[in-house]
Amino acid sequence: MTRAGRVELHTHLEGSVTPARLILLAEKYGQPGLPAACLTKDGNAYHFEGFHGFLELFKHVTSLLRTPEDFHVAARDLGGQLAADGVDYAEVTLSYGVLHLRGIDPAPVQRALAEAAALVEEADGVVLRWIPDAVRQWGVDKAWRAWEAAATAGRDLGVVGFGLGGDETAGPAADFADLFAEVKAEGYGVTIHAGEIPGMGAAAVDSIRQAVEDCGADRIGHGLAAAHDPLILATLAARGVFVEMCPGSNLATGGISAWGDHPLRTFLTAGIPCCLNTDDRALFDLDLEREYQQAGDLLALTATEHDSMQKAARKAAFDVSR
Ligand SMILES: [Zn+2]
């Protein structure tokens, strides 16, 4: 049974676009071939191979989110999905880097999202807050541009933090240290995708270390690679860095080879605050309820642990006004 009063901290708006919505958007923009490139034959689910195949899929989906109205509809859809998962507070990431790449002004988009959030709160009982993010592989200058737009939109439009996503193999987090120093100085939360991508070896641990030590990340997205490095586990625990775990996503992109291989328990044992998240719920065909169920079935997560993870997640939320 779905447990009410949950928090989700790592969920991408673009990744919540359902196959049905993708088909409608493709019709709207006269792109009839696009659903076939993204979806399984029956049109009910997405398909892709590996992490880089996923980034390609993400590109296709985001190519159909063009107007403030498109984002508004996507946010309303996501509100319904979160309510079905028992979530009453979510921090939702939106790539301002992608908006800029496509020549879309983030300001009217963020206004549309704030309006959608008010409707979602009223209709679904879910509070939505926003984490604009930059794309790592597009470099520091573009990340600054994304941050400036995020800061301009500001708290009045529900922005509570700033993040870094994209291809972790393409550049060190340390390059973004000055940017995140400013984000923190302005009182916004910092979350960085790190230790996610398979096959990076020691560089993946270093990626986490840089996110924490050079960029001052309050939260790490994924953090998988820390599981085999006692030193970085100790660093995360000592600093109280919160890890946003996304096992279903990691399984889909090859970070783990079976759901039950997820190192959640290693993090819990190390005393690192964490919770489960869907990451890109529609693209991976996931929901939060199933993620917690799997953790119970395959990793022996107890109801008490579920509740304490959720308590930690609420504490790690960036909206300090709540
Ligand atoms: Zn993510």
Image (cartoon, rainbow, N blue to C red):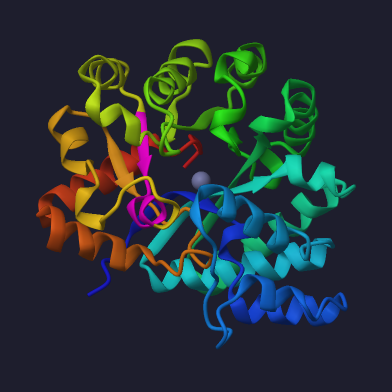
Q: Horizontal and vertical percent for residue 95?
A: 68, 45
Residue 226, picture quadrant: top left
221 inside magenta stretch: no
Residue 59, picture quadrant: bottom right
**Residue at (64%, 64%) from the top-left corner?**
75
Pick the front one: 166 or 11: 166
Residues in magenta, as a range = 242-251
**Residue 131 shown left or right of residue 104 in the figure:** left
Pick the front one: 172 or 84: 172
Q: Horizontal and vertical percent for residue 171?
A: 61, 23
**Residue at (43%, 38%) from the top-left corner?**
196
The N terminus, quarter of image: bottom left
Pick the front one: 195 or 120: 195
Q: Is residue 261 above or below residue 285?
A: above
Q: Is residue 221 above or below residue 203?
A: below
Q: Horizontal and vertical percent for residue 86?
A: 36, 67
Residue 273 visible in this rendered orientation of the protein: yes
Residue 301 visible in this rendered orientation of the protein: no
Q: Horizontal and vertical percent for residue 106?
A: 81, 46
